[in-house]
């Protein structure tokens, strides 16, 4: 009898051991809300160096991890305006060391809320900000580790919807110059990209969202900590799924895209309304997706360099703009292929038409551009935009004629390479 039992046990498959072609996914979320004191300088606008005055809603790190039996991959976001190239490089090395996710399979992004603290850079003397920056790094590394620990056999699918809450913000001013405003004639991509990830039994694991709209619903006067509409959308979707799914917001090509709601510091209702509208569209699209199993992973990073420039001494909106050559600018391109879905990352605030051209040039059935990804290269305008010197054209570090074609062609080539 004992021999028979041993034979049966030996013939049974090891349930815990993943198959070589088994697609698995997991997710995690960690709170990174700063305490009310000491106040931390806020990011995204000048003039808020005295720090935050209140906490309106919590900030989070959210992560989704994938595995296919051969590779592990992850995307991790933070409710912050962005993350420096040095921070991303340090975190990438740490995640590779601690969790075994190779740098080319890791996407690190900010949701681009303008309602969070700024992070430390080299030489920062603000002890509280240095401590908070270390906390964010710990949380992002920890969220990837937790998501990997939560891996289980999964299915995934992609869908797209529409939200008419963004508008091109490069507008003609009354004095005949171009500046920040609302331009209904300007290009604007209204697409909401949705990736739905569920267990084999259909239980929700994660929703990955992508929409091109600046996280500036609360405006420059606001000094309350808030994840703005990216956080409001994530919370709304997570509540719909009874907090069983982690809803990860990623910023699409939003460099020239503004939210339509009034950006007054007392109008948090507008933020919640935006989150509800976009969230309902995400949920509607998710319910139409029919996830499938067996996805394979592919990852690739590439650094491209474009000529740089800066405003000439004395140049301004009133005196007239002229520019001089400056240091070349590195743009970090990332590609994570999850099955037939291409997650195309760019380390900058990319103009919407570049995102559209990238999707058109991609050979993948579904492509989402994720900006503020794996570093920071500043504003990335399309070539035609340089003819109208708005705020973004003033502050971009890039000369025209390089970034648009380089991003589109390189990402298209990267997609084609990983799909072979």
Image (spheres, rainbow, N blue to C red):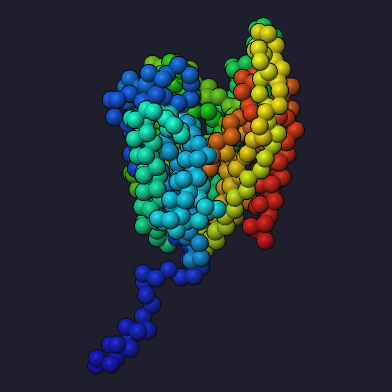
> Seen in the image, is 362 located left or right of residue 211?
right
Provide residue 289's location: percent of width, then percent of height: 51, 50
Q: In which quarter of the image is residue 303?
A: top right
- Residue 140 appears in view: yes
> Seen in the image, is 235 located left or right of residue 308?
left
Question: As displayed, is residue 240 above or below residue 55?
Answer: below
Provide residue 172's location: percent of width, then percent of height: 67, 14
Quarter of the image for the N terminus: give it.
bottom left
Provide residue 415's location: percent of width, then percent of height: 65, 52
Residue in view at x 37 percent, y 18 percent: 50
Question: As displayed, is residue 198 above or below residue 408?
Answer: below
Could you say which is closer to the camera, residue 36 or residue 209?
Answer: 36
> Seen in the image, is 306 located left or right of residue 106?
right
> How many marks overall?
0
Residue in view at x 57 percent, y 57 percent: 298
Residue in view at x 60 percent, y 43 percent: 332
């Amino acid at each position: 009898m004992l021999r028979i039992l041993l034979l049966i046990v030996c013939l049974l498959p090891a349930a815990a051991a993943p198959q070589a072609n088994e697609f698995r996914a997991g997710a995690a979320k960690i709170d990174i809300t700063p305490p009310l004191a000491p106040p931390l300088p806020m990011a995204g606008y000048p003039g808020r160096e005295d720090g935050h005055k209140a906490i309106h809603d919590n900030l989070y790190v959210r992560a989704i991890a994938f595995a296919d039996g051969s590779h592990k991959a992850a995307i991790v976001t933070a409710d912050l305006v962005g993350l420096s190239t040095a921070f991303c490089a340090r975190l990438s090395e740490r995640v590779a060391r601690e969790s075994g996710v190779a740098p080319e399979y890791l996407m690190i992004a900010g949701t681009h809320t303008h309602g969070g603290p700024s992070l430390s850079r080299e030489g920062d003397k603000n002890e509280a900000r240095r401590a908070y920056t270390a906390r964010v790094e710990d949380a992002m590394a920890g969220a990837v580790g937790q998501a990997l620990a939560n891996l289980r056999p999964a299915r995934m699918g992609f869908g797209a919807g529409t939200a008419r809450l963004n508008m091109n913000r490069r507008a003609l001013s009354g004095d005949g110059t171009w500046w920040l405003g609302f331009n209904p004639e300007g290009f604007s991509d209204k697409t909401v990209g949705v990736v739905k990830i569920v267990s084999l039994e259909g239980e929700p694991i994660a929703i990955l969202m992508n929409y091109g709209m600046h996280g500036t619903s609360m405006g420059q006067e606001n000094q309350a900590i808030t994840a703005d509409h990216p956080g409001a959308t994530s919370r709304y979707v997570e509540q719909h799924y009874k907090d069983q799914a982690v809803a990860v917001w990623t910023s699409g090509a939003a460099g020239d895209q503004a939210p339509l709601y009034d950006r007054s510091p007392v109008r948090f209702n507008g933020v919640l309304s935006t989150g509800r509208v976009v969230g309902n569209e995400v949920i509607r699209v998710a319910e139409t997706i029919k996830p499938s199993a067996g996805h394979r992973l592919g990852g690739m990073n590439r650094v491209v360099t474009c000529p740089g420039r800066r405003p000439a001494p004395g140049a301004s909106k009133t005196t007239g703009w002229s520019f001089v050559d400056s240091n070349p600018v590195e743009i970090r391109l990332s590609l994570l292929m999850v099955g037939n879905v291409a997650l195309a990352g760019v380390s900058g605030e990319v103009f919407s038409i570049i995102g559209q051209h990238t999707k058109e040039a991609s050979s993948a059935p579904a492509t989402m551009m994720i900006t503020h990804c794996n570093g920071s290269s500043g504003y990335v305008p399309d070539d035609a935009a340089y003819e109208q010197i708005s705020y973004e054209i003033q502050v971009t570090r890039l000369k025209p004629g390089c970034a648009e074609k380089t991003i589109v062609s390189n990402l298209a080539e990267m997609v084609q390479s990983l799909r072979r």
